[in-house]
Amino acid sequence: MAPKILIVKTTSMGDVIHALPAIHDIRRTMPKAQIDWLVEGSFADIPSLSGDVDRVFKVAVRRWRKSLFAKETRAEISAVKKALLAQKYDCVIDLQGLMKSALLARWANAPICGYDSRSIKEPIASWFYKSKFSISKSRSAIDRCRALCAKALGYEYDGTQIDFGLTFKTAVQTHKPYAAFLVNTSRETKLWPEAKWIELGRELAQKGLGIRFLWASPEEHERVKRLAEAIGEAAYVHPRLSIAECAEVLAGSTLVVGVDTGLTHLAAATDRPTVGLFLDYPIELVGLTGKNVRSLGGVNANPSVDEVLAAIKEVQS
């Protein structure tokens, strides 16, 4: 009988994307397996874009915490628990490694696999696992997920071949080629200076590229409007889009340049020529993975426009 497997990886966008190759490994090794995913609702578009995932179950932990004892919250939690229990999983793999995810994994009432106490983000979470595995923290985020799934399910994988398993129904159609600029991110220390985005945008516009901007929050909207106005007629600010709609914009682009954010990793996963700008984190741990990608920077870095232009030339060659 084909195994029923539940993946628990709830947040954030980049982390969810990093888990996709592991799920493709499982599908390739166990073609008839049922592979389901438990994820925060705001990121549910990502596993839904995977051709390897059968069912996506949504949680809303961030919202539930604000009204934990409300009738509506209890009803939603009960519905998710009931849906998970009905599947009767053979195995749950907690790729998140947090107390939060370990508690969510227990809702399925099935054996839980995860990182051991030395490999995990929150060591106490490993107490909830039936099977625990040592995966070095020095390995990349993608490789840690792949290694954990392989050990939990007893198969080998080829670390040199990475496939995110993404599928797209459509891509944005346009008569003019465009570059997608992903300028927004969760922390101030990850932002690339606006003056450099403007200089880069004008350089690419002179070469005939349109510039497309994506955003999520009001603050991000104000930032991209400032940049688009400074770059000029070649720039276009999209309305607020869902993750799936953003993926379509990225899939239709000629080039993507982005800071350390989930959408930049998603662009790399779609095999778009992508340059990632990392200003406060080691690129060897969270750098871009894809066929035509380049990661610039690192801790306390601030790539120059000339460095970015050189990287663009590389990924487009």
Image (cartoon, rainbow, N blue to C red):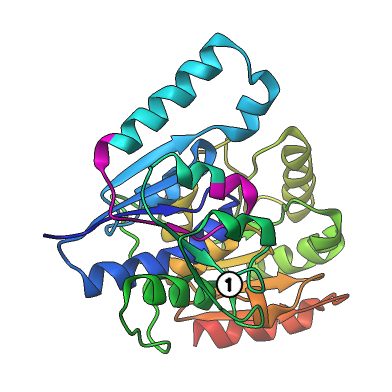
The amino acid on which the numbered mark 1 sits, given as a three-letter code, is Ala
Task: Answer whether residue 262 is visible to the viewer in this image.
Answer: no
Vertical comparison of 120 with 68: above or below: below
Residue ID at (56%, 78%): 134
**Residue 170 placed where, x, y %?**
31, 50
Instruction: Tell me residue 119's x, y (percent).
Output: 63, 73
Does residue 236 appear left or right of residue 248 in this picture?
A: right
**Residue placed farthest to the left in the image?**
1
Q: Position of residue 5 (x, y in %)?
A: 31, 56
User: Which quadrant of the structure image shows residue 188?
Assistant: bottom right
Residue 142 placement (x, y as % from top left): 52, 73
In the image, is residue 93 part of the stretch drawn in magenta?
A: yes
Q: Secondary structure at mark 1?
A: helix
Q: Which residue is disc 1 drawn over? A: 141
Q: Which residues are magenta?
A: 86-102
Q: Is residue 186 visible?
A: yes
Q: Nearer the viewer, residue 158 or 153?
A: 153
Comparing 112 with 182, the one in front is 112
Residue 164 falls within the magenta-colored stretch: no
